[in-house]
Amino acid sequence: MKAAWCERNGAARSVLTVGEMATPEPGPGEVRVRVHASGANPSDVKSRRGRPLIAPRIVPHSDGAGEIDAVGKGIDHSRTGERVWLWNAQWKRAFGTAAEYCVLPSEQAVRLPPNVPFVCGACLGIPALTAIQALRLHGNITGKTLLVTGAGSSVGHYVTQIAKLRGARVIGTASEAKADHARAAGADFVIDYQKKDVAKVAKDLTQGKGVDGIVDMDLSSTALLIAAAVMAPHGTAVCYGSNVAADVPISFPAMLWNSYALKAFLVYELTPDDRRAAIADLTAMLESGSLKHAIGPRFLLRDIAAAHEAVEGGKAVGNVVVDVG
């Protein structure tokens, strides 16, 4: 099979190789998926760039979509031919979705409704599940105002849509280049964080009260908003990432005197119950057609290095996808 892989950390064009590998066979409890589309996410490029390799050869990417073409012992043969999307394909595993075939545990291949193209299915494992879990941690958001940082990002685009579907008001932050993308997702107001004082504008938009909660992609910058009391008392900030790998200082006085809550999670490490609930929510939205999927730059497998560079550049609008077959 054709596959992309790396055997050391480094720049995309220095370490990513595309060539032939042996086609894997599914073991007990596993399925083999003929991959049609592979999602390239920021965590994928961070792994390739600097995280220690867990095996001599790594096939990147945790997200993807395709069709099951073989099953291992203990798996019902009726799954053969099923359209699926994949999660955690390369999390703590050597071989991800940047290949013509991917073998993984059966539960990590989730039925993809017929109305959802494979290219959209490649955007679900990280972006969509992150968005759903972030909002689940906020509880009932009907009638509440949420600040969604990075509302023009892959995750933020889903967060904004789902929050609006659940009756929330969304104030998003985005660069000028991605502001229209955030509005298209349903954001009620978009703040250009590069030019405006986000805390001041958010307070002005809430008559001085502050937002009820935050869905945050970068705690390293949002910590300053928390210190500025951008949230109303008893507000909750849910964080799924940071642009700084080191410790992030948080204002304890702001947290204490406003009775703020800070919740963080890693989408790769959801509890089984949380993942089942998130997948159930996502499946219902996919079947109803209520989500819009933003597909950005698309690349062929042979151009996977360019796909990684597009992710690293941070200017792509929509999800970066590698078309495998």
Image: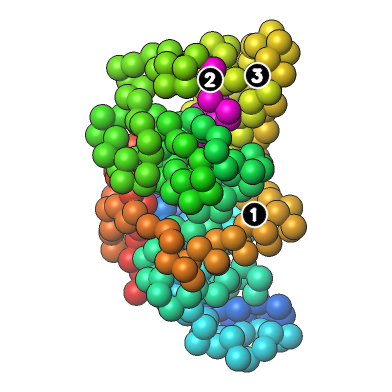
What element does badge 1 sit on? Answer: loop
What amino acid type is highlighted by mark number 2?
Gly
What segment is highlighted magenta in the picture?
209-219
Image marks 2 and 1: residues in contact by CB distance under 8 Å: no
Is 214 a magenta residue?
yes
What amino acid type is highlighted by mark number 1?
Lys
The residue indicated by pointer 3 is 233
Q: Is residue 205 left or right of residue 262?
A: left
Q: CA distance from mark 3 to mark 1?
A: 39 Å
Most foreground residue, 216 or 11: 216
Binning the other alpha carbons within 10 Å of mark 3 as few (below 14), some (14 to 19) or many (20 upward) gives: many
Residue at the (67%, 59%) spot, across then down: 277
What amino acid type is highlighted by mark number 3?
Pro
Residue at the (64%, 43%) spot, across then down: 140
Image marks 3 and 2: residues in contact by CB distance under 8 Å: yes
* Residue 132 x, y percent position in the rendering: 57, 50
* Residue 169 x, y percent position in the rendering: 47, 37
Instruction: Give the colour scheme shown.
Output: rainbow
- Mark 3 or 1, nearer chain start: 1
